[in-house]
Amino acid sequence: MTSIKRKLGSQGLEVSAIGLGCMPMSQSYGPADEQESIATLHRAIELGCNFFDTAEVYGPFANEELLGRAFKDRRDKVLIATKFGYKFADGKRVGKETNSSPAGIRKAVEGSLRRLQTDHIDLLYQHRVDRAVPMEDVAGTVGELVKEGKARYFGLSEAGVANIRRAHAVFPVSALQSEYSLWERNLEPEIIPLLKELGIGLVPFSPLGRGFLTGTAKRAEEYPATDHRHGDARYQGKNFDTNQKAAAIVQYLANEMGVISGQVALAWLLGKGENIVPIPGTKRRSHLEENLAAVNLRLDGEQMARLDIALDPRHIVGQRYPDDGMATIDR
């Protein structure tokens, strides 16, 4: 996939068509394996993937430190996206509390630069909208950091229509990162049309439905308590059965095409627009190689329509986050 690039926004940011979500290397999906994680990061570069997504809150801090070690001698080959916006005390995250004050942003960025062992962040996201801080102040502060050379491009995560417009009016937003997949289609009514209007790219996280769309999902109770899926409502009880039935079309199409389910799910996303760059997360080289191969898969109009219909949002049951997590989403 070396030559396959996509543009995020209208400000000049160009990245590999599929990126790598690095969070699973440090949290939420079982025990960490630094050796395999670093090997996966290096393999991604070899395969032409240059877009890596992290955040100060992953670990917390451990994920940025991991990327700092892995990319120390490869910084010119990678584009790093990281995020600020949560509140910390004594090195630990304070619940779901946010902090996007101008001083808080600057402190977070200095910490990220130190952990990443770099002098600039390629794409700097606000992780969640901070309802206590005007979006104009957030965008203005990031704009100053761009002028100072500490960041190159500005992004938002899980922001709603009003705040995207407010931010973009102050300093251009290059990308919105939000959950979007066959499994989660909440962006389609309002957000995606807005991104097209403003020329903002979309970076879908959890593009494989937290593993559900790979065809290998197990019931919630079969995952250890340290695994995010153990507490995921969509993996539990009757929800799991209903969602498996809806997702069966993905496996069916994959068998028909001689590929694997996850590749079909990623190809569907890539087929939704040239401004979309999914970031499937993994900590294993084998999964990375499978995911990146999806860039060569094309779905025709009939196949896209079949997937759209089978995985209509009305056919998926269960909330994607617990209530406290849903409360952080700006929609």
Image (cartoon, rainbow, N blue to C red):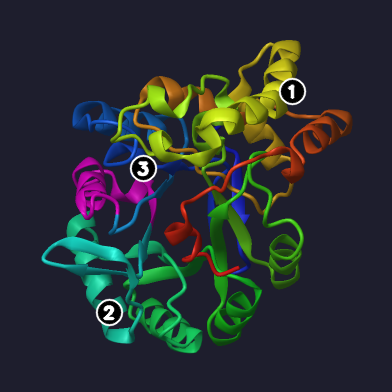
For marks 1 and 3, the one nearer the N-term is: 3
Type of the residue with mark 2: Gly
Q: Nearer the viewer, mark 1 or mark 3?
A: 1
Q: Quadrant of the C terminus?
A: bottom right
Q: Which mark is residue 22?
A: 3
Residue displayed at 26% across by 48% down = 63
Total label count? 3
Instruction: Say whether marks 2 and 3 touch (CB < 8 Å).
Output: no
Give the percent coordinates (x, y) of residue 204. Answer: 57, 49
The quarter of the picture where residue 175 lies is: bottom right
Looking at the image, which residue is at 35% across and 44% down?
A: 23
Chain-order first, disc 2 or disc 3: 3
Image quadrant in which the N terminus is located: top right
Q: Nearer the viewer, residue 78 or 214?
A: 214
Question: Quick check: can you spot residue 292?
Answer: no
Q: Position of residue 58 (x, y in %)?
A: 29, 51
Q: Which residue is mark 1?
A: 249
Q: Is residue 254 above or below residue 224?
A: above
Residue 179 location, x and y as percent?
56, 51
The three-letter amino acid code for the residue at tag 3 is Cys
Image-based side of 127 in relation to 12, left or right:
left
Q: Secondary structure at mark 1?
A: helix
Q: Which residues are magenta?
A: 58-81
Q: Is residue 110 magenta?
A: no
Kind of residue at badge 1: Ile
- Residue pointed to by mark 2: 104
Distance from disc 2 to disc 3, alpha carbons, whole Å, reads 24 Å
- What percent of the width, then of the height, locates residue 108? 26, 71
